[in-house]
Amino acid sequence: MSSFKTVDTRKLVLLALFTAIVIILQILGAFIRFGPFSISLVLMPIAVGAALLGAFAGAWLGLIFGLVVLVSGDANAFLLVNPAATVFIVLFKGALAGYLAGVAYKLFANRSKTIAAVLAAVVCPVINTGIFILGSYVFFLPTLTEWGIAAGAASVTAFIFLTLVGLNFVFELGVNLVLSPTIVRLIQYRQDKENV
């Protein structure tokens, strides 16, 4: 019985640690910008947390990420246009990215934990950015068309992909691909050593 409580305590402590990391990295990431929006450095700890603690923990971490984005003012340009849609998109994209990263990891972990970690690291930014793009088209197309014209973009699609998400997505995906699988492997190595 005490072993069961120890495992739960460890998971809670890890979840609290990852939650703190998500908050700190999102606040610090607000100062790193490529284009009009900050880089989401938090996708890496979300993917790692989802891999280590499961899909629901990933959803929790993604939700925290979304809350910090809203509180920090990083979504203010969209909040001014449509507050309800902005809150929905920001919270939903983070939570779904974390959840699906955990699902991807679990589906492949029995075959190869490294491949599973890489998949979780890819799924997280792809879902986060994909939901942002979809939400932009559904809720903000007229506004983004105006912003694109003002920026001299050839089309609203070019504006969305090249200005709003282009470099950000490439950077976020790169960071996740490099760091997440390595961190997951290190933590799992440590956990395996403790279980021996």
Image (cartoon, rainbow, N blue to C red):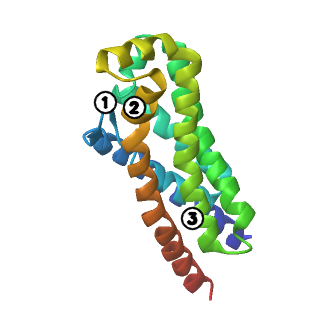
Gap in Å between the C-alphas at discs 1 and 3?
28 Å
Q: Are marks 1 and 2 in contact (CB under 8 Å)?
A: yes
- Say above or below: 158 vs 77: below
Q: Residues within 10 Å of mark 1 (few under 14, many from 20)?
A: few
- Residue 47: image quadrant is bottom right
Gap in Å between the C-alphas at discs 1 and 2?
7 Å
Label 1: which residue?
Answer: 36
Q: Earlier in the sequence, mark 3 or mark 2?
A: 3
Which residue does the image show at 68% across and 57% down from the upper left? Answer: 104
- Horizontally, residue 107 falls left or right of residue 91, namely right
The amino acid marked with disc number 1 is: Pro
Q: Earlier in the sequence, mark 1 or mark 2?
A: 1
Residue 18 visible here: no
- Say above or below: 170 vs 69: below
- Horizontally, residue 171 falls left or right of residue 54, namely left
Q: Quadrant of the N terminus?
A: bottom right
Which residue does the image show at 31% across and 44% down from the upper left? Answer: 29
Q: Nearer the viewer, mark 3 or mark 2?
A: 2
Which residue does the image show at 62% across and 53% down from the upper left? Answer: 101
Label 3: which residue?
Answer: 118
Helix, strand or loop at disc 1?
loop
